[in-house]
Image: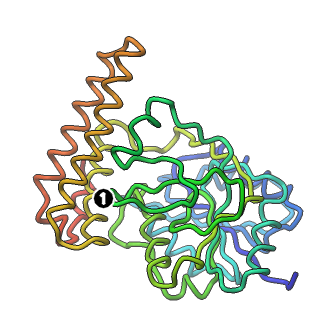
Amino acid sequence: MMAKRVSVIIPTYKRYEDPLLTLQSLNTQTILPDEVIIFDESPDDRLRQILKVVNMGYPVRYVWAPSKFPSLARVRNKSTRLAKGDIIVFLDDDVILHSEYLKNMLSFLEDHPEVLGVTGCITNIRLPRLYRMFSSLFLLFRQTKRPKVQRSFIPTMSSCKEHVPTQWLSGCNMAYRRKVLEKFDFDWKLLKYSYSEDVDFSYQIYKKYGSNSLYLVRGSLLIHKKSPSGRLLGYSLEAHRCVTNLYMLYKHFGDTKLNILVFLWRNSGEILTHFVSGIIHKDLKTEIRNILTILRAIKFALKNLTRIKKGDIIELQKYH
């Protein structure tokens, strides 16, 4: 394998213990990264103090850049400018990597020079049976042989039984060749946790360079804990999802009335899932509250449809 400098970028926000598990799993890699950049938009630098007592087998650079309006997409762009590697790996701050995660990913890129980006296999994804029942009909998150981006702009995942070409890379673990990141930016308009920023970025590469430009690497295994810390909740989460999902539909599929129908159809599936779940688990009261939150978020997005179609979404993401 030819020596390639590898930079790992870990964006973080209001998480102080989770990143340590990610760093520890990086420390067990059979091939260590050449540098790790932790880009922290938290209002305080508590993580800096925690990192001071951690010994790792690779250099760690901690960047503290508190922001009134945090943005995962913008952090990815800013940290890319700081990275020195030929291969740049983005990891969420709540993942745990198998010891050969990096080795398998780098080997695949070395053996396939035409491939521009890769993602690994998340081993702990378990979609509820009820959700799987409705996922195909309503274009929700589901499993297909090859990962693809559906017309709802909700991606699908693979069973990870083999290396397969994909139309998108998962933001919790993805690696790109530097030359790709020099040509493309993550969308600067996306704030907060930047819903679908990973699908948006990688799907553009797929559309430009074709079906063999992106791959899912079977042997690069990881666990995505999905830590509850620092996340949007309730209406803030649903409004953010609705605004950015509609924005992506117009960005990628053009100004067509079909976007509204697909948007409403997809959300109808989410609502139906909540309703049936409430009946099955005898907790209809909770699920009705969830449904009302989704309806309120849909109303907010449709009320601002003109602005969304124009791409004027920054203010819409700031205050809900």
For the point 50% across and 30% down, the residue is 129
Q: Secondary structure at mark 1?
A: helix
| Residue 277 coordinates in the image, percent (x, y) | 38, 23
For the point 42% across and 68% down, the residue is 200
The quadrant of the rendering that contains the N terminus is bottom right
Answer above or below: position of 215 versus 303.
Answer: below
Instruction: State left or right for residue 97 relative to residue 1.
Output: left
| Residue 259 coordinates in the image, percent (x, y) | 21, 61
Instruction: State left or right for residue 233 relative to residue 182.
Output: left
Instruction: State left or right for residue 112 relative to residue 143.
Output: right
Residue 85 lies in what quarter of the image? bottom right
Q: Which amino acid is tagged 1?
A: Thr
| Crowding at mark 1 (Cα within 10 Å: few <14, some 14-19, many 20+) | many
Answer above or below: position of 247 versus 77.
Answer: above
Closest to the observer, 255 or 86: 255
Closest to the observer, 68 or 301: 301
Instruction: State left or right for residue 49 relative to residue 108.
Output: left
| Residue 182 coordinates in the image, percent (x, y) | 54, 87
| Residue 156 coordinates in the image, percent (x, y) | 49, 54
Answer above or below: position of 161 versus 103.
Answer: above
Q: How many marks?
A: 1
Residue at the far top: name it: 282
For the point 25% across and 39% down, the residue is 268
Q: How is the image coloured?
A: rainbow
Residue that mark 1 sits on: 244
